[in-house]
Image (cartoon, rainbow, N blue to C red):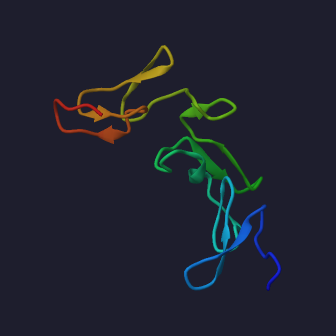
C-alpha cells in the first residue's frame, strides 16, 4: 500500500511495472505535476490551447478565442479571415491554413 502521490486530482493506478498516476484534464507527467494544455484537444496536435506558466493554467492560443478556445480569430500562412473562418491560399489547408499541401490538394 502507498499513499496517493498524484497531484491535481490524478488517480494512483497499477501500471505494467510500477504504480503510476492517471492524470485529469490538462495535467501530465509521472505525478500529474506538469501542465500540458495540448491534452484538452481531441488529437493534441492543434494550437487551440497553450500553457500560461505565469498562472499555471491553460489559455487560448494566438489564433483562438472564446470560453473553450473554439472561436477562430485569425489565420496563419497568409490565410484570409472571413466570416469567422480562414480562407486559405492555394497550397495550404487546415482550420487556420497551417498545413502545407501539394498544389491542387486541400485538407
Residue 51 is situated, as x and y percent measured from the top left of the image, at 64, 53
Residue 3 lies left or right of residue 73; in this view the side is right
- Of 16 and 96, the residue lying toward us: 16
User: Which of 92 and 31 lies nearest the eye of the viewer?
Assistant: 31
Number of disc labels = 0
Residue 20 in percent (x, y) is at 65, 76
Vertical comparison of 39 with 68: above or below: below
Residue 21 sits in quarter: bottom right
Residue 45 horizontal side relative to residue 92, left or right: right
Extreme top residue here?
83
Q: Position of residue 62 (x, y in %)?
A: 56, 38
Above-or-below relation of 5 to 35: below
Q: Position of residue 53 (x, y in %)?
A: 70, 57
Name the residue at 38% across, 27% down.
79
- Decide: is 18 above or below 21: below
Q: Quadrant of the C terminus?
A: top left
Tell me the residue at 59%/44% (across/down). 49
Which residue corresponds to the image point at 36% horizontal and 30% vertical from the top-left? 78
Relative to 9, is 96 on the left or the right? Answer: left
Residue 90 falls in image quadrant:
top left
Q: Where does the N terminus fall, quadrant-wise?
A: bottom right
Query: Considering depth in this image, is 51 or 33 the residue closer to the camera?
Result: 33
Amino acid at each position: 500500500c502507498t499513499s496517493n502521490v498524484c497531484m491535481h486530482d490524478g488517480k494512483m493506478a497499477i501500471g505494467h511495472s510500477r504504480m503510476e498516476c492517471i492524470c485529469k484534464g490538462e495535467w501530465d507527467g509521472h505525478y500529474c505535476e506538469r501542465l500540458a494544455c495540448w491534452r484538452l484537444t481531441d488529437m493534441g496536435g492543434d494550437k487551440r490551447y497553450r500553457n500560461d506558466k505565469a498562472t499555471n493554467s491553460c489559455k487560448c492560443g494566438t489564433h483562438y478565442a472564446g470560453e473553450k478556445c473554439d472561436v477562430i480569430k485569425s489565420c496563419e500562412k497568409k490565410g484570409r479571415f472571413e466570416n469567422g473562418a480562414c480562407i486559405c491560399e492555394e497550397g495550404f489547408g487546415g482550420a487556420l491554413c497551417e498545413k502545407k499541401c501539394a498544389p491542387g490538394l486541400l485538407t
